[in-house]
Image (cartoon, coloured by chain):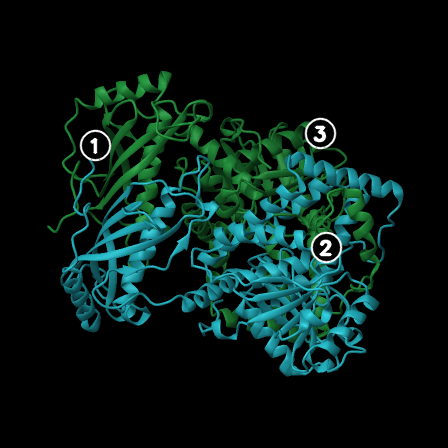
Chain colours: A green, B cyan
């Protein structure tokens, strides 16, 4: 359920080259740029740069909601005029051209001739065989399929498939690169049209197309029936585990002996594909449009709604460290490892500067109270890390718990404001830790918000208040002595009163 | 995207009868009981009552995390010895026996003879035709299929399918009953084996079974590939909308003209079903067991994990009021309508008594700070409702925003404690509202926690602080005058200091 907690930051490439900047190529650009990777984009289509910029803007917005861990400085986006420039000096070339075999073969062949022999080259194809794609390539052993999903910046799967000339080492290197930008690579064991995901997804789609064709349900009803039922479980368990749980049988073989015969029931139209006649296309088109009209949104509003919901689902799974939520958790640990450590010594502790994302604003354009709470609780977490409270200390000795918090908003923050949280220890003794956080906007002389907090040390054994132990005790007392030399913050000890 | 905000509470039945208390019947029992409906259960199998009680315990735990809106008093569970007792005086009979046509026909026929002619009778079958099930029933016009999903207490779809003798009025009444307990009914337009969901789900399952059979991937890899990719989107968009978005085409017909030909690609094994040979069953069984071993959980831990993740996904979708999240939002509105209104006059405002659920505790058994914050912010919301701030006032005049909050924990709360939040208005003028909340445990003489809060009225037009308007102004000033006669809470105006 959880992944190994190894450091992933150092495997992140410095630069990659993209061939094609459509929905998929633009999504790759956004994922790599927001992870601090330099992107060189080749796409001769008019408007390609604008389209990539739009996707990048959507991705920035989504990432602001996805995580509160500071992101690295964005990688640069450079549009180049040739394949040779796109592949020059990069560690990975990702081809995302339209799904036409000859076109992809030609692009990949040209890229393989221009790139250094060790440069990885991957194709985003959702169905074409890698062995066919690598025909005509120079050094085909560094080529494989890496199939992503829309939106590439949010959905974590990278479905890898090697061709007959691919070296195993190339698949391993590609997996590390995709993992370093928060993805979850799965390597398909046998080369097959449509790999795993397109096959499973298409089977469901074909059946849905029949149901609309035969007027069993409208497009809206089919989609609702799926997303309000087993679709709700899909991020949690795949199709195989689902059927095993359906019979409430812990033994896998016995579960399949009981469930398997259901496969033979005449439920699905196994043998045919519905003809796309004009009549059928008219009906289907009208129903799909009615579905969007019922939601009363434009196509780009629908895209943002999809992203907001994906973020909500991902954050939900993150809280359980389950499924795609464990990929998100691993990525956040990698990001945290790259954050510079707070300054040592007598200066108050500082969190890295953070740019207020627009997702933090309520409908009045104000930063919501929950976000101030989050900022200040991150600052407290920072102090606890600094004095050495880690998983081992928590298990053997205990940790600090908040018993009193006083949060004050003094200035209105806006999206794009650069803020830093500065923490001063007002007092520490054997049990108590008294903190004062100031949320400072760059350029201001006073805080935008403050939070004063009293914490009590709770012992791991008793679950009740008890003294802080060992090295942590030494560090927290030393920090309090150093901070006692600093001036006391103006609002420390204030009470709520009418001004 | 959002549903109509009509009142749903009054359509909730007083009592229902269940035939069968397995995974599905037990899930129905839990959903109805937790919604305050009396349940009469008939299941001659040994251990049926214990199994239903286990499911009910899981459901209580999940509901504690799913919503903070107070639930109605639980309905009673009565185990009866005959079909006649189960159907006597109830508004709905739900049959959830094993999927064997003759068995179901016999149960339904007997139930229809014992029940009053107007009693609705529904079958939970996932695939059998309602016209076949209603053969031999008395008053078959009040029978239909209502197919639920595991776990029935969390997944909202009720897939309704009428048979040839079903009266349309019966489907409409059934839809209202399921909606009253938080479900989302979808009526299948033509009677068909497997309805909508079993057909779509089975198509995907069959393809997944082939992939394992042919060693393209292990069970774990197939399931991971699905849940980390398009499966992550399934609660958000169904299979049809997914393919329309894949080609980035706002017009439904044009999207299908572009995407449709993909259906004919030879990706899926259309014509066959894999033989369940011993060799295949051994392999599949081992892989399914390995999948569970890798997660290092027992079967019942897996069930709880599934529930926790479903709750997390549902709460995420609730925050966007999208998909199954809108069904949850509608259900919560219905629950709120049933909550008694706070007392009028000079007494402080009280929220209804709430029992602390075990999901609110951290690993030390303490109620987490977030939960106190939620309790106090609910209390503030209660005051705003009481003085008449509604959607119309927010749009025309504005609302109150918190500028300062002081939260204090005084006593430790435990799971099962009954608490009430009491709010006193300390001061109100044209712009400011000064509140004091006390979280009181039943039987205690002092509060377990307090929160003092200063709010400022923000005008809808300017987005800046501005005077409260009209009737809301009159009500808030009157409330402050009445509360000024009460003694001032001991901790009002306190600051954080070392004791």
- Pointer 1 and pointer 2: residues touching (CB < 8 Å)? no
The residue to which callout 3 is attached is A167
For the image, the number of numbered tags is: 3
Residue B204, label in figure = 2
Spatial separation of the CA atoms under disc 2 and disc 3: 32 Å
Residue A46 in view in this figure:
no
Instruction: Using the rendered image of the protein, determine whether residue B168 is visible from the camera's viewpoint.
Output: yes
Q: Where does residue A155 sit, x and y in percent of width and height?
A: 55, 47
- The Cα–Cα distance between marks 3 and 1, rounded to whole angstroms, is 68 Å
Residue topped by disc 1: B499
Co-location on one chain, circles 1 and 2? yes
Foreground mark, 1 or 2? 1
Q: Alpha-carbon neighbours of circle 1 within 10 Å: few (<14), some, or many (≥20)?
A: few
The percent position of residue B172, horizontal first and vertical second, equals 60, 78
Which chain hosts label 1?
B
State the image coordinates of residue A134 (x, y, percent, origin top left). Answer: 72, 39
In the rendered structure, the answer to whether residue A476 lies left or right of residue A117 reads left
Quarter of the view holding residue A278: bottom right
Q: Secondary structure at mark 2?
A: helix
Task: Determine whether, in the image, residue A459 is placed left or right of residue A103.
Answer: left
The Cα atoms of the two marked residues, 1 and 2, are separated by 63 Å
> Are tags 2 and 3 found on a single chain?
no
């Amino acid at each position: 359920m959880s992944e190994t907690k190894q450091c992933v930051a150092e495997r992140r490439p410095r630069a990659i080259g993209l061939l094609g900047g459509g929905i998929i190529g633009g999504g790759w650009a956004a994922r790599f740029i927001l992870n601090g990777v330099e992107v060189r984009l080749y796409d001769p289509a008019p408007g390609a740069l604008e389209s990539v910029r739009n996707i990048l803007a959507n991705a920035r917005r989504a990432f602001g909601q996805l995580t509160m861990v500071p992101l690295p400085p964005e990688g640069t986006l450079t549009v180049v005029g040739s394949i040779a420039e796109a592949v020059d000096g990069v560690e990975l070339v990702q081809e995302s051209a339209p799904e036409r075999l000859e076109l992809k073969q030609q692009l990949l062949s040209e890229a393989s001739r221009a790139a250094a022999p060790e440069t990885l080259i991957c194709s985003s194809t959702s169905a074409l065989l890698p062995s066919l794609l690598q025909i005509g390539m120079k050094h085909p052993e560094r080529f494989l399929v890496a199939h992503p999903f829309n939106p590439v910046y949010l959905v974590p799967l990278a479905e890898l498939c090697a061709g007959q000339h691919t070296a195993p080492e190339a698949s391993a290197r590609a997996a590390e690169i995709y993992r370093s930008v928060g993805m979850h690579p799965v390597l398909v064991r046998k080369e097959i049209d449509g790999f795993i995901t397109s096959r499973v997804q298409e089977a469901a789609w074909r059946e849905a197309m029949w149901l609309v064709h035969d007027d069993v349900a409208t497009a809206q009803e089919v989609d609702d029936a799926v997303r309000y039922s087993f679709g709700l479980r899909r991020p949690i368990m795949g199709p195989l585990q689902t059927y095993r749980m359906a019979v409430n049988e812990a033994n896998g073989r016995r579960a399949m002996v009981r469930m398997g015969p259901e496969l033979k029931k005449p439920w699905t139209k196994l043998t045919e594909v519905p003809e796309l006649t004009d009549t059928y296309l008219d009906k289907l088109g009208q129903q799909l449009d009615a579905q969007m009209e019922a939601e009363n949104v434009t196509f780009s509003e629908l895209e943002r709604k999809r992203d907001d919901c994906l973020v909500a689902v991902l954050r939900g799974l993150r809280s359980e460290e389950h499924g795609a939520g464990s990929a998100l958790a691993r990525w956040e640990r990698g990001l945290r490892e790259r954050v510079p450590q707070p300054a040592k010594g007598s200066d108050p502790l500082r969190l890295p500067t953070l740019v207020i994302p627009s997702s933090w604003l309520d409908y009045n354009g104000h930063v919501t109270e929950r976000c101030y709470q989050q900022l200040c609780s991150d600052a407290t977490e920072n102090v606890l890390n600094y004095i050495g409270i880690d998983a081992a200390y928590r298990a053997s000795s205990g940790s600090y718990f908040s018993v009193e918090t006083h949060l004050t908003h003094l200035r209105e923050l806006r999206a794009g404001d650069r803020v830093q949280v500065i923490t001063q220890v007002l007092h520490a003794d054997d049990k108590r830790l008294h903190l004062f956080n100031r949320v400072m906007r760059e350029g201001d002389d006073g805080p935008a918000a403050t939070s004063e907090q009293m914490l009590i040390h709770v012992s791991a054994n008793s679950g009740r208040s008890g003294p802080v132990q060992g090295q942590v005790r030494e560090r927290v007392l030393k920090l309090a002595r150093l901070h006692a030399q600093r001036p006391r913050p103006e609002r420390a000890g204030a009470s709520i009163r009418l001004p």
